[in-house]
Amino acid sequence: MQDSINYILRCISENKEPLPVDIYLQPFFDLNEFRCLGAEILARGIHQHTVVPPLFFIHSVEENTSEMYRLGHHILRQFFEHMERSSGDEQQNKLYSLNISLKQLARPHFSDDIIALAQRRKCSPHNLILEITETCQERNCLAAQNLHRLRQYGFSLAWDDICHSEELEEKNAFVLSDYIKLDRSLLMDANRHEAKSIIAHAHGKGQKVIAEGIETPEHVDFMRQQQVSIAQGYLFSRPLEKMRFNAQYL
């Protein structure tokens, strides 16, 4: 495994194309009809038939802004190419989410690069939710401008891994997103009161809520009681290779 990790990091650092990173898709479901609505796009390192989860290499990449941007651009390109190859009525009705960091958003012309990729592959922006992940990067004017440009073009925005009501209020003051994604820790019994507060706050702002980490029918019942209808987790599916996702859900 360590050899594979070192190889992946070296390729990203040296910008060796094609990068040994592919996309996997974790389906998310409608909790009322139990049908697949789409999927979250996840990165996986690939080396000599070894699949390397991002937790083994992503933190090293995040330390270098250029490498993070390079990897993020590669994942976006993989997604848009997959969408172009899999075009069809069923595909066009699916919704996908993909993580972007504030470090990426603070890069000049970041929004223009994403829009150019989508236009080149003739992909509709309405299929994609951009999940904003928190980093040590300060939320600045350039990030706000990029987010405004992306939303203006037609992409949806989401705040990722929301744990506390105060955190959501602070992030919404920066940008009011279309969606929020609840941190899986809110499914613990001790955190149910906080979960209810966050969901109520989001619904009051007109934001849709996505629950992640759903692993039991009891988790489903709790989310349905709170009027949350979109969820992902191992109860439904682990992340799948893109062609396996197509075979099962398109």
Image: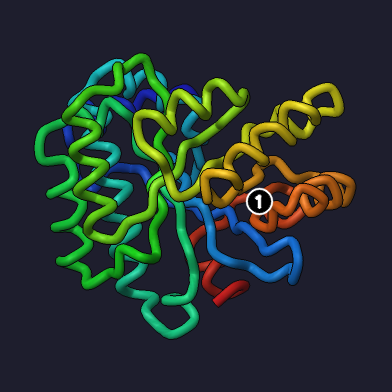
Q: Residue at x 28, y 69 (%)?
A: 123
**Where does residue 71 sit, x and y in percent of width and height?**
28, 37
Q: Nearer the viewer, residue 81 or 36?
A: 36
Q: On the image, numbered disc 1 is attached to which residue?
A: 232
**Where does residue 234 sit, x and y in percent of width and height?**
73, 48
**Where does residue 92 sit, x and y in percent of width and height?**
42, 76
Label 1 SS:
strand
Q: Name which quarter of the figure residue 31 lies in.
A: bottom right
Query: Which amino acid type is shown beneath numbered disc 1?
Result: Gln
Residue occupying the far front of the picture: 204
Image quadrant occupied by the C terminus: bottom right
Residue occupying the far bottom of the picture: 89
Q: Residue at x 24, y 19 (%)?
A: 64
Q: Nearer the viewer, residue 22 or 164?
A: 164
Say whether residue 47 is visible: no
Q: Is residue 29 above or below residue 130?
A: below
